Image: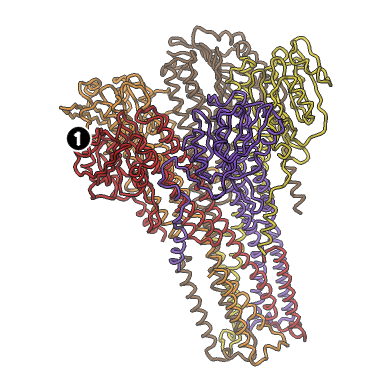
Chain colours: A yellow, B brown, C purple, D orange, E red
Amino acid sequence: MAKPKKRKLLSKLRPRKQSKFDKKMGKAPGTITYMGKREGKPSVVNIMEYNNDDLNITSPGDIETIVAHRDPPMTSWIDIIGISDEQFIEQVGKRFGLNSLVMEDTVNPHQRPKIDEYEEYIFGVFKMLYIDDDTNELVYEHVALILLENCVLVFQELEDDVFAGVRSRVRNKSGRIRSRGADYLFFALLDAIVDNYFVILEFLNDKIETLEELVYQNPTQEIAHEIQDLKKQVLKVRRWISPVRELVGRLIDSENPLITKDTKVFLRDVLDHSLEINESLQIYREMSMSLMEMYMSNMSNKMNEVMKVLTIMASIFIPLTFIAGIYGMNFDHMPELHWEHGYPMVWGIMIVLFIGMMIYFKRKNWL
Amino acid sequence: MAKPKKRKLLSKLRPRKQSKFDKKMGKAPGTITYMGKREGKPSVVNIMEYNNDDLNITSPGDIETIVAHRDPPMTSWIDIIGISDEQFIEQVGKRFGLNSLVMEDTVNPHQRPKIDEYEEYIFGVFKMLYIDDDTNELVYEHVALILLENCVLVFQELEDDVFAGVRSRVRNKSGRIRSRGADYLFFALLDAIVDNYFVILEFLNDKIETLEELVYQNPTQEIAHEIQDLKKQVLKVRRWISPVRELVGRLIDSENPLITKDTKVFLRDVLDHSLEINESLQIYREMSMSLMEMYMSNMSNKMNEVMKVLTIMASIFIPLTFIAGIYGMNFDHMPELHWEHGYPMVWGIMIVLFIGMMIYFKRKNWL
Amino acid sequence: MAKPKKRKLLSKLRPRKQSKFDKKMGKAPGTITYMGKREGKPSVVNIMEYNNDDLNITSPGDIETIVAHRDPPMTSWIDIIGISDEQFIEQVGKRFGLNSLVMEDTVNPHQRPKIDEYEEYIFGVFKMLYIDDDTNELVYEHVALILLENCVLVFQELEDDVFAGVRSRVRNKSGRIRSRGADYLFFALLDAIVDNYFVILEFLNDKIETLEELVYQNPTQEIAHEIQDLKKQVLKVRRWISPVRELVGRLIDSENPLITKDTKVFLRDVLDHSLEINESLQIYREMSMSLMEMYMSNMSNKMNEVMKVLTIMASIFIPLTFIAGIYGMNFDHMPELHWEHGYPMVWGIMIVLFIGMMIYFKRKNWL
Amino acid sequence: MAKPKKRKLLSKLRPRKQSKFDKKMGKAPGTITYMGKREGKPSVVNIMEYNNDDLNITSPGDIETIVAHRDPPMTSWIDIIGISDEQFIEQVGKRFGLNSLVMEDTVNPHQRPKIDEYEEYIFGVFKMLYIDDDTNELVYEHVALILLENCVLVFQELEDDVFAGVRSRVRNKSGRIRSRGADYLFFALLDAIVDNYFVILEFLNDKIETLEELVYQNPTQEIAHEIQDLKKQVLKVRRWISPVRELVGRLIDSENPLITKDTKVFLRDVLDHSLEINESLQIYREMSMSLMEMYMSNMSNKMNEVMKVLTIMASIFIPLTFIAGIYGMNFDHMPELHWEHGYPMVWGIMIVLFIGMMIYFKRKNWL
Amino acid sequence: MAKPKKRKLLSKLRPRKQSKFDKKMGKAPGTITYMGKREGKPSVVNIMEYNNDDLNITSPGDIETIVAHRDPPMTSWIDIIGISDEQFIEQVGKRFGLNSLVMEDTVNPHQRPKIDEYEEYIFGVFKMLYIDDDTNELVYEHVALILLENCVLVFQELEDDVFAGVRSRVRNKSGRIRSRGADYLFFALLDAIVDNYFVILEFLNDKIETLEELVYQNPTQEIAHEIQDLKKQVLKVRRWISPVRELVGRLIDSENPLITKDTKVFLRDVLDHSLEINESLQIYREMSMSLMEMYMSNMSNKMNEVMKVLTIMASIFIPLTFIAGIYGMNFDHMPELHWEHGYPMVWGIMIVLFIGMMIYFKRKNWL
């Protein structure tokens, strides 16, 4: 009977024939292939061009207008939403003079976070993490930032509001963003992404606290599953977030002229935040392991309690039943049976035994 | 029935809509927003101005008098208690020529410990840790130290007595504090903070020893929870304390002219203490894991004991009851029932069985 | 009885007399001895000679023709399939001026991945990993790449299709492969190997997900074995894959003139992929440990459930049986036996007891 | 009932009001306060002054005579036993020109091992570890070594015989000690301390081996406690011993003119021993964790055995008792009861059942 | 009763009075004391003197003849077997101009592996590991190699055949050994030692595989002990083997003129092998931990099975016995007893109950 099960098990363990890498396998490096799931929508382009005095907001549709912002008189922020239109993205890349490997990573949502410095630009890939309101699961979105001399190119998988704060600061001239160059904008966007990670940390923190409470109250198997889920989420979040620290650190240490010394002071602040995030993730990891341990210890406690009830019931009533059994025997010659007070005497013995057992268990602290 | 439970569980796991980061999110970096819980109190400023001969203690209320101590003829220690008055803090920062990022970290009690060197000043953020006498829980307080050329600015969330020793040394001219400059004062304050950590270590050490004893005596579920709490406390304390070592190490290695070579010898002492603290925390971590292990092993022992009682009782009395059952049968033809000594013979058999079982269990070391 | 078992156990633990290293032991270093299992087949040589304009594909049999491609006017890719013909391999090595240690590693399928730089060539050993379709097990194949000035020598244990994509790109002039030199070809082959690792990752990922589901449904001992197998596979894969990251990193940092600066940009991409692979393997490792933990917790849960059934059945029926035993005694004077409603009263007591127990277990959440 | 227990638990967990740091807290750094427990004894001073030809041994009582040995014509070893006389120690420190921080560490028995280099001297703090013969516990003693140009100052908490070997080598002119300078003496003392650690390692090793044997024989809860004790001892020993390696390593690398190149060769030997000690401690740590694991597995085994006995007894006799119960029923119409061979038949059925069960359990390998 | 046991336990835990370090303690560093167990045999000296053309093999007994080979015209390999004759070894050391610390390490079989570079020679200590054919245990042998300008001195504790391969290569002029200098011989010996480690790895690998199989089949306590033994063996092997990697790495990086650039290429090969060995040991460590986990999970499984049998037997027969007990009561008024079909009806009820329970357990997958 075990055999066919095994075979079924094995068949389940066979790899799927259709791989998410199939699209990519065997193609030349630098081939621009969108590998995400959100296909089909055309890209939308929003451009903010600003200096301390002026601000132009446009949404051009044709590529020529976009490319015109490559070397603008003002600082320009070119925001491209939707990266599934491979040809369009390739065109933009070519016209902005970007390496094809850069463009390949731009449209690959599975790319791990990285910052690569080229002679004329700095290229960064990051993940934005959200909690889906419906499923309560973590979802992540791929973002690519390219810092050129007077211009920041942003590629986003989805339109979202993480950059809304930066946008309104540009609009309202709040803070120093309007008076500084493209490198400060690059920093501001990076800062917005990293700040957003704190929401995820808080989500994880809340989850840990809730699970902790639940484990203390009533450790069910569901909670064990939730703890394992939590562990997996912490692992995944760590994977997407933790490289940021090293990347930003390297950017600060680099001599790249695209980033001014003033902006580096601000990048140090981002570095600081990523350090803090990494430390928190490390703590969450240890806490989720602690949770599992607590769960196991509570399970063990419950088992102990179950066993105690069984042992007490059995230890008390099995000997009593034995005594009753004795006087249920049908021997011709059983003098006790004929004693006038035989029956109450047996009751007496049984009660004494019962009380003795109770005292014994009380002393053992089992009651 | 499991389904609605699951839903309830999930709803508990949903993130709270109100986040402690809401206040901050989307604002420009360098925006000075107090993010702690102790709002509303106006800041109190105490200034000690001293050299080897003189000592002036004042508590000015207006900002001009405070700023006058920026470049004093003597060494001055400006102690600002209460950091929730954002405007006041911002004013102080501006007048002392401090970076807005510095001021942002100054009023952020969630900021992790750090030391940042600027051209004209050194900025440090630390945590002071206390044990709340009522709840017996760890609380931490945020402290920012800024070393300028002849002046140390201190921002404290709460008035407390960690610096009382330093203050009285200044007052009483004890030690060398009065004859040395602002950098020595900076060191003395840092030293006071780090020395204070030893109290926390002792608290954790006592807790470990008490729990160890309790685990040996009677491992209840409550103790398991206390052990888990301990683990969390060690994690948290480590988070706030452990960066200090690296920070002080870097400060000693830096070439900053604000810190004299003489003072570096003393900073080495602080470094030494932080090393010792980190080692202790590492040991506490391993010991708390050991405690949990011991707890589990004691639980397992107790279960074993419960099972032994059950097994002994059941193994002895179930066979005896079976024998009694035999002679309780009502067959017409059961010769033993009619034997004259049938009844005592059965008793004999049962007693022999009983003694045999007892010897068996004795040999197995179960009794 | 334990003794002979022990001896049997020990005899099983004795090392086999025939070792896979016997062939090698005691020979001089640099001795070219094929140590794999796929012996006996003669080597097949395929040569692709190309530049941007021309492409020649040949399969020469004699060594002179092969050696003629050592310093060709065009870029040449010499692919040698089958490495068990030691004499042939040794000849090739000598004629191409390769160190005997290089040739020793070339024919040793147990060699761990490495990249060694010599003055005139760069030598790399890698593993290609496959999933055997029949046994569903991991198999690995040994590949050696040697980059000379205008030529790449490839030694493969088996003919396989990992390089098929590169081959077709050369044939079809797709991408930039035809317009670049031997170092780009070297990169392209390395890239093909590393890309292939993603298939293995996906296989492992699928296995983890399937096992996770199975552990949740019904944790049998078979699944525990599968989890342990998974752990071993992750360990083995990590062993063969993880060194690649460091090797490629060192190659990028080296000043070797054989690799142009242009190609280094592409190697950075390979480095990036190996980083990602290593991170994934780390995560898989933690997840497989989590799986085992989950398995143990589910086992514990099941045990708890079994114990509860036993405890409930025994706790309810043992006392009831005792009561029945009481009134099965044969005392002459048992007044209850003669009461008219004695029998229904006993039933009443028993039903009350039964209901009481049910309520008790319900309250304890055991039902 | 759980509440008051909790409160009691919490009250036990409250920190003691009297802290070992109270003495120190708030005092200026560099204040010389003895923090150990061995107070009240006056310091004893033994001086050995030697060169290759002569040897003077004195025990001066007044400080002037001691200080006269600061710059002696010969090499002098000043051994000060007893460090609780703060004023005396402070005087010595001042007269020898030592930093007050050095003197503070000298009298602080909680100071972790360290080596600090000053311009005119090298200061080292180490721990000597002993096994108390009565309690079989580890005790440690604080030792400070100060290397000046021609003189080594030693501060010992207790008089002990670790340095006896060095003393007799000086006395007997054995080895090269008499022909070399103060730095060789410094090395010889350090070497004596480190050699002494091997005795501790052996003690730990013996303990591990004894516990291993005991765990295999009969795993009682006491042994679990001993294992936990062992783990704590390894942790503590590691704490006191492991820094030595790094400290000696740094001393070898330093350019300090107080230590000649010849002596560095010998220090390398000390470094080597500390490396070996650290490795052993690492192994002991893993072995003590292994012991705990073995203990748990043996506990689990014992539980299994207990359960098997219960299961076998219950599975055999409960069904037999049921059969006996059947024929103990009092129905008017039970034909079997009146069969002539009813009783032996029932015995037959029961014996068959018994044998069947025995075979079943035998097959399951439970007997 | 627990008290005397405890005392017995403690007495077992007391350190032995006779320590293996007693011989050494208190002696001056550089004292040549043999600390192994294989005393009493006089040393045997074998000398091979060779160049590309000639080969002389001698076994001189007197020290003068040996020393004459210190600066030979040809390359000479001086093999000294047996290191317990302290005076002889000391003489050799002095006459060859070796540091007394070197000679101390040469005769100390507990010395951890090391390579020390002196101005005129390179000194290396290594362990050779064997599996004892009788006890199936690991034994190790101490080997010291000293590379002088034209000569390699080898000190072996025991005569063995690890160097037999090298010896025969010298004899047979196979490979390049005869045409190269002393540094190549040094490498060849080191290579022979490291190659020998692969046999140990294979032994461990076989043991792991055998234990894995046994754990799957029938996890007895003996197997748990074997797993723990395995873990200890892996720890010990790692201790002796793992330093080799770093030592050889440092030797390659050093600028020592005793080792030619050509030989460094070969040393890289040794480095490569030690890397591989270290990785394997790491994997074996993880696999032995996995084995223990598997053992625990199988134990848990077996316990589950035992519990299931108990629960099924008890849950089925206890209620049935209760029913039988009911109708064994002796009430005067029990109408069922007098029904004509009472008895078969009770059987009916009992059979229905039995079938119901069977279905219930079947559904729970317990059968």
Q: Quadrant of residue E169?
A: top left
Residue A29 in the figure: left or right of residue D149: right
Q: Does B326 appear above or below A231?
A: below
Q: Position of residue B253 (x, y in %)?
A: 47, 20
Q: Quadrant of residue A181?
A: top right
Q: Does D115 appear above or below D134?
A: above
Q: Can residue A276 be seen here?
A: yes
Q: Position of residue B210 (x, y in %)?
A: 49, 44
Q: Position of residue B117 (x, y in %)?
A: 54, 17
Please give the name of the residue rendered at 26% of the width and 30% of the height, measured from the top-left corner. D79
How many tags in the picture? Answer: 1
Please give the name of the residue rendered at 62% of the width and 67% of the height, measured from the top-left corner. E309
Residue D60 in the figure: left or right of residue A136: left
| Quadrant of the frame with the C terminus of chain E | bottom right
**What amino acid is found at the position of numbered circle 1 in the picture?**
Ser
Q: Quadrant of residue E2?
A: bottom left
Q: Position of residue B118 (x, y in %)?
A: 56, 15
Q: Which is more toward the observer, E232 or E5? A: E232
Protein chain holding label 1: D
Q: Which residue is mark 1?
A: D174
